[in-house]
Image (tube, grey):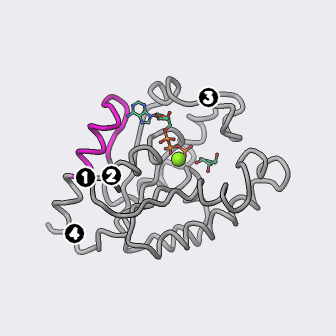
């Protein structure tokens, strides 16, 4: 069955450390389109994420994030969302009809990758990651139109596979 959804914006969702930022950037390069990362947009406008969580709280961060997502989704681009962006109902609604790629990974794979000190929601490490993933899994799976697992292969290979898949979709 062919997918009638437009390819762009091509959106990456998924848990922290799954590779949305790194893989998204590579896929954008391979497809020769612009790349937006909503965490980076927020940092550029409002400052470091841990400081926003600390001084303004998660709810304010989620509002900034909703605005960044809305801006990015207006572009013909690859758009990587922050891991929790899908918690905002307006963001979930905004994703309707778009091509949404879920990047999944196991807790073991992520534990070997990420610096939890830079992620305000992971103060207690991998246990936090698993709990948050379990809480969000149903949302990710409902929104995704396609899923790739990033646990075992290098970034370049996964990005290459996704770019090939996207070219077949265009
Ligand atoms: N397939 C992979 N193999 C090995 N390391 C990886 C892989 N994918 C990502 N990484 C590493 O994991 C770390 C986190 O990746 P990245 O920042 O892209 O995740 P993310 O999904 O954007 O997370 P967040 O939701 O926190 O923004 C980086 O150091 C990256 O190099
Ligand atoms: O999964 C999350 O809730 C988060 C993921 C990161 O991308 C950042 O958006 C922030 O650290 C929160
Ligand atoms: Mg990221």
- Residue 23, image quadrant: top left
Report the residue marked by disc 2. Answer: 27
Asked if residue 15 is positioned above or below residue 168 in the image, the reply reads above
Residue 85 screen position, x and y as percent: 58, 58
* Secondary structure at numbered mark 1: helix
Q: Would the CB of label 4 be found within 8 Å of ligand 1?
A: no
Are dots 1 and 2 in contact, CB under 8 Å?
A: yes
Q: Name the residue at 75% across, 54% down.
A: 58
Q: Nearer the viewer, mark 3 or mark 4?
A: 4
Are dots 3 and 2 in contact, CB under 8 Å?
A: no
Question: How many other residues sit within 10 Å of disc 4, few (<14), some (14-19) or many (≥20)?
Answer: few
Report the residue marked by disc 4. Answer: 3
- The residues bearing labels 1 and 2 have C-alpha atoms spaced at a distance of 6 Å
Q: How many marks?
A: 4
Q: Quadrant of the C terminus?
A: bottom left
Report the residue marked by disc 3. Answer: 127
Q: Name the residue at 29% across, 40% down.
A: 158
Report the residue marked by disc 1. Answer: 163
- The residues bearing labels 3 and 4 have C-alpha atoms spaced at a distance of 37 Å
Residue 49 screen position, x and y as percent: 70, 49
Q: Would the CB of label 2 be found within 8 Å of ligand 1?
A: no
Q: Name the residue at 56% across, 59% down.
A: 38
- The residues bearing labels 3 and 2 have C-alpha atoms spaced at a distance of 30 Å
Q: In this picture, which residue range is highlighted in magenta?
A: 148-163
């Amino acid at each position: 069955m062919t997918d009638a959804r437009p390819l762009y914006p091509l959106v990456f969702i998924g848990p922290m450390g799954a590779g949305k930022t790194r893989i998204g950037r590579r896929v954008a390069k391979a497809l020769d389109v612009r790349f937006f990362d909503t965490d980076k947009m927020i940092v550029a406008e409002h400052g470091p994420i841990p400081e926003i969580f600390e001084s303004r709280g998660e709810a304010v961060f989620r509002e900034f994030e909703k605005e960044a997502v809305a801006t990015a989704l207006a572009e013909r681009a690859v758009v990587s969302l922050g891991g929790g962006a899908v918690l905002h109902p307006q963001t979930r609604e905004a994703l309707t009809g778009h091509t949404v790629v879920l990047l999944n990974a196991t807790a073991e794979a992520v534990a070997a990758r990420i610096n939890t000190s830079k992620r305000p929601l992971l103060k207690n490490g991998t246990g936090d990651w698993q709990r948050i993933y379990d809480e969000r899994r149903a949302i990710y799976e409902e929104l995704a139109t396609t899923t790739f697992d990033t646990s075992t292969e290098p970034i370049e290979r996964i990005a290459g596979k996704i770019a090939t898949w996207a070219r077949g979709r265009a």
